[in-house]
Amino acid sequence: MKTLNLTATLMLLGTLTLGMAATVDEQIAAIEAAATPEERVTLVNEFKQTISALSAQERAEAITRLRANMNKDGEQLQTQTQTRERTRERSRINQMEQTQEMQRTQQMQQTQAGSQAMQQNKIGAGAGGQGQNRFMGNR
């Protein structure tokens, strides 16, 4: 009789443990899939109530599973953040390169305009003899 009671108790305990494991996994999946932060908080609070009924070892395993899943989400978020930062940095670099190119082009155009003006002054001075001083008359 004692053996039968002990066996029945162990079977019941095993069934409850397996049922809790499925519930814990389902709750972790629901926490991951939460659409809003408020829903996530509610689900985490329910998860806390569930694990409070577990043994110390089961509780530790459930928390470890939750942390592992949260780390996956954290790594994915970190990867997205790094990609976003790289994209912004590349955009800034491209913008700086475009600005430098525009400045070089502008400086080159100004140099060309100055050279053309100097050439025109030389041509004007050579054709008129005395250039700009001619209007004053010969002395």
Image (cartoon, grey):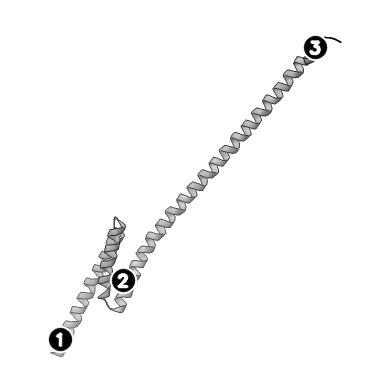
Numbered disc 1: secondary structure = helix
Q: Which residue is mark 1?
A: 5
Badge 3 amino acid: Met
Badge 1 amino acid: Asn
Q: Which residue is mark 3?
A: 136
Rate crowding at label 3 as few (under 14), some (14 to 19) or many (20 or more) other CA atoms within 10 Å: few
Q: Which residue is mark 2?
A: 62
Q: Quadrant of residue 16?
A: bottom left
Numbered disc 3: secondary structure = helix
Numbered disc 2: secondary structure = helix
- 133 to 1, vertically: above or below: above
Badge 2 amino acid: Ala
- In the picture as drawn, the residue positioned furthest to the bottom comes out as 2
Q: Compare marks 1 and 3 and give the one earlier in the sequence.
A: 1
* Residue 52: image location, x then y, percent: 27, 74
Pair 1/2: label in front = 2
